Image (cartoon, rainbow, N blue to C red):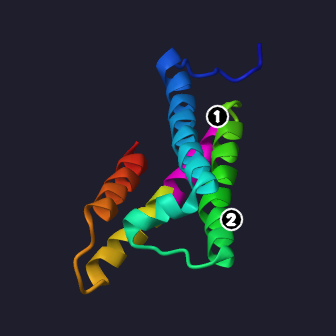
């Protein structure tokens, strides 16, 4: 037999990446649905006021649509072992980018932010670590 020896992998090492991707996808999907369903309810606790139809439509597209697309991509990656690394990298980079940007905003804002921002920051960082 001339085939290279394949390393043995535990069931945990095969299932864990798919589970993490599924969890991340579910999180993005939940936020996407909330932003698509009622963007004003999502924006208001953060002090964001959607003043007209353009603002509401844009909030749905950017927050709802982007998170929906990412959720679908992560689900797609979770279903195939050859795509899981790409999904994990994408999830890490997106959550890292959001978390670093949110932390930067907190540090430079010049006035206090609400607990909602800190809650989102913790969520970003926990997702990044996983």
Identify whether 93 is placed above or below 78.
Answer: below
Q: Which residue is mark 2?
A: 61
User: Quadrant location of the C terminus?
Assistant: top left
Neighbor class of circle 2 (other Cα within 10 Å; few <14, some 14-19, many 20+) is some
Task: Give the residue at x 42% y 72%.
Answer: 101
- Taking the magenta stretch, the answer to whether it contains residue 22 is no
**Element assignment for label 1:** helix
Q: Give percent across and percent down for residue 124.
A: 40, 55
Residue at point 39%, 72% (across, down) = 47
The segment highlighted magenta reads: 83-94
Res. 63 image quadrant: bottom right
Q: Which numbered marker is on residue 78?
A: 1
Furthest toward the front, the residue is 52
Residue closest to the far left: 112
Camera-side residue: 63 or 107? 63
Most frequent secondary structure within the magenta stretch: helix
């Amino acid at each position: 037999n001339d085939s290279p020896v394949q390393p043995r992998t535990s069931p945990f090492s095969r299932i864990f990446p798919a589970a993490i991707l599924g969890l991340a996808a579910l999180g993005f999907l939940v936020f996407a649905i909330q932003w698509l369903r009622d963007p004003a309810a999502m924006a208001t606790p953060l002090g964001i006021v959607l003043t007209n139809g353009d603002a509401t439509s844009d909030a749905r597209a950017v927050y709802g649509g982007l998170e929906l697309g990412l959720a679908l991509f992560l689900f797609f990656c979770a279903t195939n072992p050859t795509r899981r690394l790409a999904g994990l990298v994408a999830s890490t980079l997106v959550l890292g980018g959001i978390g670093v940007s949110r932390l930067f905003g907190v540090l430079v804002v010049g006035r206090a932010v609400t607990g909602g921002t800190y809650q989102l920051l913790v969520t970003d960082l926990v997702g990044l670590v996983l």
